[in-house]
Image: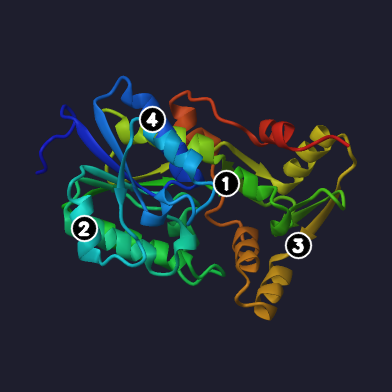
Amino acid sequence: MQADIANVKQRILVLGAGELGLSLLRGLAARAMTQDVNISVLLRHGSLDSQQEPGKGGKIEEIRALGISIELADLIDATVAELAAVMARYDTVISCVGFAAGRGTQRKLTEAALAAGVKRYFPWQFGVDYDLIGRGSPQDLFDEQLDVRDMLRSQHQTEWVIVSTGMFTSFLFEPSFGVVDLQAGRVNALGSLDTAVTVTTPEDIGKLTAAIVLQEPRIANQVIYTAGDTLTYAELADVVERVTGRSIERREWSVQQLQADLAAKPDDTLCKYRAVFAMGRGVAWDVAKAYNTQHGMDVIGVQQWARENLSRS
């Protein structure tokens, strides 16, 4: 049995400070005012060099102002042993390093966390329900996420928590994704107009994950779900109409059509995502089962996000 970490000062390490990582750091720092925790973030050496990474200076200043310590390592170049040596100094490690870090990174970080013997590990699983989607989906990167789950479930030394959030809300409206085409006044439904999708904003994911991390009694060896909203593409079109005051055309991009698009462009990341979300499996769940609903925590729904980010014309 592990020693109880409930009544001692927790040492928490967040990997990465991108959009989600910074939101999580803010959420943890807000709770650290009333809970006894030390928070650190792991960044690349170049993150501290304003000439090497222009525009990062403000982020570093904010991190330091929040009272968060900075660890330095290169997740890509560092060995598993080197990363494990850093992680071993912490009780809880939370990965906010996503797919952009490259293939194999999720397995590498999990291997390092297990080698370090950290008490609890939150892998980068801030997305869909990979168990339900299964292996061999149109988005081949998802198989690595299942590898991570297998690695964690096959051992009993390190507790793990997976936070399933659905799609980032902003991505649903990303012009390159093609679902909401404001220029054409159209919503292109992935699969069908009745296909549903769950979304959560990165800000809410950070806030909710911070609550999950510090909840007592602590959560361990579970998949936890969040949901800023769950809606069909028909409902999404209704939202866009209400918010923009425009008539919105509704089109369906069938699974067959999107699979054909992927076959024509097998390396196109957006084609992969469109195809897997069109299938509708593991990409949506009832808001009633979400952590935020069960704990009465306010989150931003799609209509509120649209009102704050889409202009009327």
As rendered, which of 41 and 189 lies closer to the eye? 41
- Disc with the residue nearer the chain's start (2 vs 3): 2
Estimate how packed mark 2 is, as few (under 14), some (14 to 19) or many (20 or more) residues with alpha carbons within 10 Å.
many
The answer to whether residue 3 is seen in the rendering is yes
> Residue drawn at (23%, 51%), measured in percent from left and top?
87
Dot 4 corresponds to which residue?
66
x, y (%) of residue 268?
63, 71
**Cα–Cα gap, marks 2 and 3:** 45 Å
- Disc with the residue nearer the chain's start (1 vs 2): 2
Q: In front of the other: label 2 or label 4? A: 4
Dot 2 corresponds to which residue?
84
Q: In front of the other: label 1 or label 3? A: 1
**Cα–Cα gap, marks 1 and 4:** 25 Å
Asked where in the image residue 138 lies, by quadrant, the reply is: bottom right
Q: Tag 4: residue type?
A: Leu
Q: Tag 2: residue type?
A: Ala
x, y (%) of residue 224?
40, 42
> Residue drawn at (39%, 25%), measured in percent from left and top?
30
> Considering only vertical position in the picture, is 232 above or below 267?
above
* Secondary structure type for disc 3: strand
Q: In front of the other: label 2 or label 3? A: 2
Dot 1 corresponds to which residue?
168
Estimate how packed mark 3 is, as few (under 14), some (14 to 19) or many (20 or more) residues with alpha carbons within 10 Å.
some
